[in-house]
Structures are given as C-alpha cells and as structure tokens.
Image (cartoon, rainbow, N blue to C red):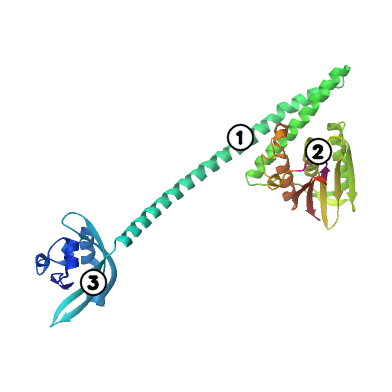
Amino acid sequence: MQTTEDGTILRVNRAFSDWVGQPPEALLHRRRFQDLLTMGGRIFHQTHWAPLLRMQGSISEVKLELARPDGVGIPIVINAIRYEKNGIACHEIAAFVARDRDKYERELVRSRKRLEELVVDATRLQEEAKDRALFAEQMIGIVSHDLRNPLSGIALGAALLTRGQLSESQQRTLNRMLWSADRAHALIADLLDFTQARLGRGLSVSIEPMDLHHTIADAIDELALIHPGRAFQHKTAGEGAFSADRNRLVQLVGNLVSNAVAYGTPDKPVTVTSGVGSTSFVSVHNHGAPIPQQKQDVIFKPMTREAESNAGRSVGLGLFVVREIAKAHGGEAQVISTPADGTTFTVSFPQR
C-alpha cells in the first residue's frame, strides 16, 4: 500500500481491501490510512507514527488494529518507509495480519494479571497466617506463664502434706500428685521455651564453668526418683571441665530421658553418656523399636512425636526444645535409630 504523507491512500492491493471490507475504488484517493484504524490506532498514528517517519524515515514492527465496518477488529503488524517522488513525500506500507501474535499478547496480559492477583492473594494469606501463628504463640506463652503460679501452689501444698502422719495409700496419692505437678511444670517450661524460640529470640542461656559429668549424674539421680522401677546407666568420657548453662543441660537430659522412658523397652536400661573433648556431647540411648526414617527427618520439629500410639504422652515439644538448647550453646542435635542398636539421641557442643 502507498499513501501520501497525510495518509491518503494512493495504491492498495486486494488483500488489504478485503481486510477492511471495502473495494479498492472506495479507498483510493478517498480514504486516509489512519481513518481505517481504531481510535487508539488513530491517536498512535498522529502522536508517534507520523513524527517518527518524518524524523527517521522508517518504522518497523508496529502493531495496530483495523476497524471494519462490521465492527470486527483485525490486528495487523506494519512496516513503513518514507520517500520522496517528484518532490512529493510518500509512504510505502507493508502489513500482515497478526491474529496469532495478538492472541498470544492478550493471553500474556491475562496471565500476568492473574499472576499479580495470585501474588496479592498469597501475600495476604501469608500475612494472615503469620498473624494467627503469632497470636497463638503469644497466647501459649501467656497461658503457660499464668499456669505456673496456681500449679506451684498445688505442688507446695502437696509437699507440706507429706510431712504429716500419712497412711501408705495417702502417701502414694501425694507422690502421684507431686509427680504430676513436676510433669506439668516441665510441660509449661517446654511451652514457654517453644514460644520464646518461635518468636525469634532463641532460648536464653547463662554460660558458666561446670563439671559436665557431675551435672549429668545429678540430673540422672533426680530422674531416677521420677521414674521408679526404670534402670539408668551413666557413662563418661574425658575430663569433666566444661562451660554451659547447667539448668539448660538438666532440662535437655530430662527431655531426652523422658522420651527414652516413654518409647524404650521397659526392662532394658536407659544409658546416658557425657563426654568432654574437642567436641563435647551428651547422648541418651534406649532399646526398643526404631524410629521410622521419615519421622527421624522431622523429629526435632515442634508438635512431632515418635509414635502415634503414644500421642497422648506429650505435646511433642520436648525434642524441639532439646534442639533449641543445643543451638543456644552453638551445638546440634541428631538421632540414630536402628533395629539392631536401638535409638540414640546425641547433642554435641563445641568446647569453650
């Protein structure tokens, strides 16, 4: 197609005439090229097309849309050059229909818009989930903290009653009350530690020199009173000089031993080993059915238990707290569990 500089059509082929739905004689010297475009195309022709052709003499790969009399638009891609003939400026225009390209671009725009909507929805859901999780963790911390005072009162009252003259059955009942109170205190401590760790602060520790072997031995003696009828062994390796938070280590051993007692073979001893060297460690071993591999991969995550049949024994925070105590000391926790050797939880620490 050929036009004058103002767009008047001087030459046109049959294909273009068919696209616009008008015969050539209705176009030649009667219509301007820009008048055959949609409103957006006319604006583009005036603001970009004509100035660009005057400045650089050609344009390429411009996408416009023809407006047919029946209202159906035809997307076209145009290349044009400007030249002068006998002192008159003319435009040579080559156009081809670009329905596939137009369809692709429209799909691309729709997909991009849909992706943006999905990103907005995902961001909103993520923020809502964060808010709910934060609220739940804060509530756990508040409730756990508030439970300590009445529980301490119950434990103190039970301890005072043991000083009086009691029958054997009354003494057993009080012992069960004291054991239950101790267990509840341990669960509350785990919940508070869980809240502190999940809120991003990590567990607080107070590092001081200590004897690792003596600390672990004292913890085992206390645990033996809590778990009468279970056998415990304590093995040591290396000298005992070590630096750590004593209370946190006692808590760590208590969680690991309680876990071993709950899931280990009742007639086999629970073995606790403490070692000091270039890398110090505390390990707890029990005999019994191994932990499935898929559970070993997630066992230190919160709300995870070794076996579903024992789900009622804890809220699943003990091993999570063990890992957090290890991290607070710069160490790590791991588990090895096989049918032949039983289950061993090991927490290793860098020497200080």
Q: Mark 1 or mark 3: name the one nearer the start of the chain.
A: 3
Residue range of the region highlighted in magenta in the rendering: 284-290
- Please, is residue 270 above or below residue 276 in the view? above
Indicate yes or no whether the magenta region holds residue 344.
Answer: no
Secondary structure of residue under mark 1: helix
Residue 224 is situated, as x and y percent measured from the top left of the image, at 86, 35
Is residue 204 visible to the viewer in this orientation of the structure?
Answer: no
| Amino acid at dot 2 | Gly
Dividing the picture into quarters, in which one does residue 199 lie? top right
Image position of 295 (left or right of 46): right
Q: Find disc 3 in the rendering and name its residue.
A: 94
Q: Find disc 1 in the rendering and name its residue.
A: 139
Query: Which of the two discs, 2 and 1, sits closer to the camera?
Result: 2
- Please, is residue 291 above or below residue 41 in the view? above
Is residue 233 visible to the viewer in this orientation of the structure?
Answer: yes
Query: Distance from label 1 to label 3 (Cα)?
Result: 71 Å
Residue 176 is situated, as x and y percent measured from the top left of the image, at 81, 25
Image position of 126 (left or right of 205): left
